Image (cartoon, rainbow, N blue to C red):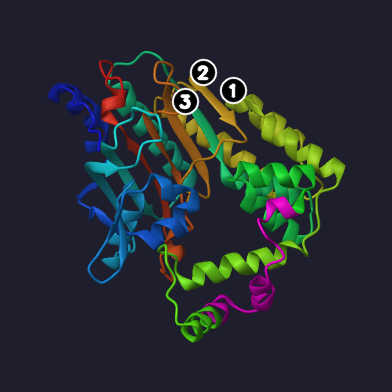
Amino acid sequence: MRLERSIPAEALDAIRAPLLAAGAAPADAPVMQPLGLLLDLAGEAMRSRLFVVSGDGGEEAALRPDFTVAVARQHFAGGASAGRYRYEGKAFRVAPRGSDRAEEFLQIGIEAFEAGDPVAADAEMAALAWAASAAGGRGDLSLILGDVSLFAAFVDSLDLAAPLAARLKRAFAKPRQLKAELDGDVAASSDDDKSRIAALLAGLTEAEASAVLQELWSLAGIEPVGGRRPAEIARRLVEKAETAKAGRLDAEQAAKVRAFLAVSDRPDAALDAIASLAGPNDGSLKTAVGGWRARLSGMAAGGVPLERATLAAAFGRAFGYYDGYLFEVRSAGLGDERPIAAGGRYDGLPGRLGVSTTNTGAVGFMVRPARAYAGGGE
């Protein structure tokens, strides 16, 4: 496992300082996290980046690749309705083949589970992440912004059939599937929509479909492998069955989606371009664009230089639990694949963790101090 280079204590203190002033309680989340849960939340593509460990009882776990899920689990397990946490510790990810990236590295960050104005909270998190990143001394920083929910609002404006709109939203974070949708290749966008098991489960609730799968496994005398929970497998199979019934984009709709995904400009100009692409049912998109203008004002007031920011409509992150605004602080010297800081909104995560009722939003960010430090190279 390749270790990250350490940085001078005074540099780490400077990078850490904005987080210390943010009024967050210290948190120390467990290093080991359930593999199945991580795959359910972050997506199957994350498996190759995880360090997997098998316990004596056969349960599979992974070294935490990030702190968001770990801190969220700890927060909701404690029964608190709201909380803001500051963490500092090691995270672990398998480096891409041929890469020299560190596989054990220091992350610091904040996760906030709070009621109130989500737009203001988003702006605050981006400003804190920028301040911490800039404290490392690099002069080549930039900020890229995106929003999963902005794409969802745009899709809603097109007034598509509900199954098609849902499938398109799911494909946003999966470039291959999204390309297949735009090219009209429905079969390729759904992996295998002719699955007989998927057809069998179609129309059942998630609990019913999960029970059917477990009964089939029991009759066959087999145990599922790979850390996936029955409910998650059932949900994915049902989605495949529904795909075949969802139809496809016509040429005009596909062209509008391509135009949306091509938007990448200074934030105000990008919002103007997105608004101009709205379909006939544009109420949600107008609201989302208005929220973004307020978010940008808050970021500027918090010290973020918006002249260094780009709003890219197609920007997404590998962790599949983000469902709102997203950002990364990047360094020209390190390149786009090694962000210094990253974060966003994940309001849907509590429900996916089994929390039945909560009136709090969820937003946070992480900073890689070794990347922020001007004398560092990782």
Q: CA distance from mark 2 to mark 1?
A: 7 Å
Q: Are the residues at dot 2 and dot 1 in contact (C-beta closer than 8 Å)?
A: yes
Magenta-drawn stretch contains 208: yes
**What stretch of residues is rendered in magenta?**
187-210
Which mark, by number, is residue 266?
Answer: 1
Q: Position of residue 83 (x, y in %)?
A: 30, 55
In terms of secondary structure, where does tag 1 sit? loop
**Residue marked by disc 2:** 307
Q: Amino acid at mark 2?
A: Glu
Image point (70%, 41%), residue name:
179
**Marked residue nearer the N-terminal end (2 or 3):** 2
Which mark, by number, is residue 336?
Answer: 3
How packed is label 2: few (under 14 Cα within 10 Å), some, or many (20 or more)? few
**Marked residue nearer the N-terminal end (1 or 3):** 1
Q: Amino acid at mark 1?
A: Arg
In terms of secondary structure, where does tag 3 sit? loop
Image point (68%, 73%), residue name:
196
Q: CA distance from mark 2 to mark 3?
A: 18 Å
In terms of secondary structure, where does tag 2 sit? helix
Between 336 and 165, which is closer to the camera in this rendering? 336
Residue 23 appears in the figure: no
Q: Which quarter of the rendering shows the N terminus?
A: top left
Q: Which quarter of the rendering shows the C terminus?
A: top left
Horizontal relation, residue 203 to residue 360: left or right:
right
